[in-house]
Amino acid sequence: MYQFFVEDSQVGKDFITITGADVNHIKNVLRMKPGEDVRISSEGGHDYACRVLEVADTFVQLTILDDQIESTELANPVFLFQALPKGDRMEYVVQKAVELGVHEIIPVAMKYCVVKLDEKKAQAKVRRWQAIAQSAAKQSKRSRVPVVRPVMDFASAALYAMECDCRLVPYENECGMQAAAKALGSIRRGESISVMIGPEGGFAPEEIEALRDKMQVISLGRRILRTDTAAAVMLAALMLRIEMMEDQ
C-alpha cells in the first residue's frame, strides 16, 4: 500500500483530496486507478486508510475507510545532531534516520568537519535533505515527515540538545559498555532524546569536554565506526529500546 502526506486542510469529514506533485506521481508513474487503497498521513500526524475514488489531472479524490489506524511514530521523540560528513553521506544519514524513527535531524558544523558550507550552499543542501526525508518517510510508512533543521554551529546545537530529557553522545574514545547499557535502560516512555554524533575527525577536545558535564558520553563498542554508521547504530539501539517498551 502506497503512502502519501497531505496538509490538514486537505482532509474532510469523509474525503481527502491530494493536490500538487503527488498527483502526477499517482497518475503517470504509479498509474493508480479508482478502487486502489492507500495510506494517508496529515501534517498533524493523523493516519487514514483510504481508497481512490477519482484520478484527475490536478487532483486525486480519496474516500476515508478508517481514521483510527495505528501511528508508526516512536513514543519518544529522538533528535539527531549530526556533524556534517563529507561527500553524500549526509543523504544516507537522513534516509536511514527517517527509517529508524527520528523526530528531527539537525546538521552541525563542528571543528573537525571536512565539509565547510557557506549559507547559500547550506540552504540548498537542507532543501535536498528535506526532500530525501520526505521520500524516506513515504517508503517507511511514517505518520509524519521529520524536519531537517538549518545547519547549526556547535554551540547552538549543544544548547538545543540540552533541552531534551535524555542526552547521549557516542564517543570513540570512551571505554566500556556499562554507560551505554545504563543510559538505554533508564529511558522512560515519552522522554525526548538527543543524540550528538561527531564528524570523521572526531570531536575536538573542547567540544567533548563541553558536552561531558551535561550529556551522557557513551561507547558504541571497541571498533571505530564511520560517522554515518555511528548514527545508524545509535538510532537502531534507541528504536529497539523504545519499541520494546511499547510492547511491555
Image (tube, rainbow, N blue to C red):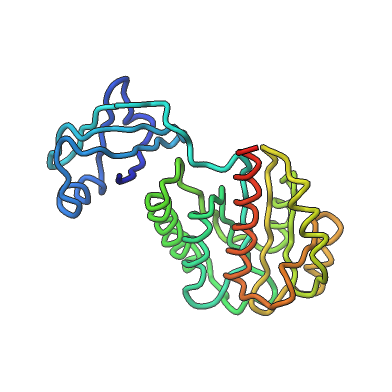
Residue 46's quadrant in the figure? top left
Nearer to the camera, 30 or 203 = 30
Classify residue 229 by image quadrant.
Answer: bottom right
Q: Residue at x 61, y 76 (%)?
A: 226
Judge left or right: residue 195 versus residue 37: right
What residue is rendered at 56% in x and 47% in y? Answer: 103
Q: Is residue 219 left or right of residue 104?
A: right
Q: Residue 177: horizontal and vertical position, in percent?
A: 79, 65
Residue for point 77% across, 57% down: 181
Q: State the quadrant of the C terminus.
A: top right
Tell which residue pokes out farthest to the top in this image.
13
Q: Which percent across, then down, holds residue 162?
A: 75, 50
- Residue 189 lies, with reference to residue 13, above or below; the image says below
Q: Is the residue 72 above or below the residue 210 in the image?
A: above
Front-most of residues 194 and 158:
194
Q: Residue furthest front?
A: 248
> Eyeballing the image, is 73 above or below 118?
above
- Residue at x-position 51% and y-position 49%: 147
**Relative image position of residue 201 (x, y in whole percent):** 68, 79
The relative height of residue 114 versus residue 14 in the rendered view (above or below) is below
In this view of the protein, which residue sits in the foreground, 69 or 14?
Answer: 69
Residue pushed farthest right? 213
Which quarter shows the N terminus?
A: top left
Tell me residue 238's x, y (percent): 64, 53
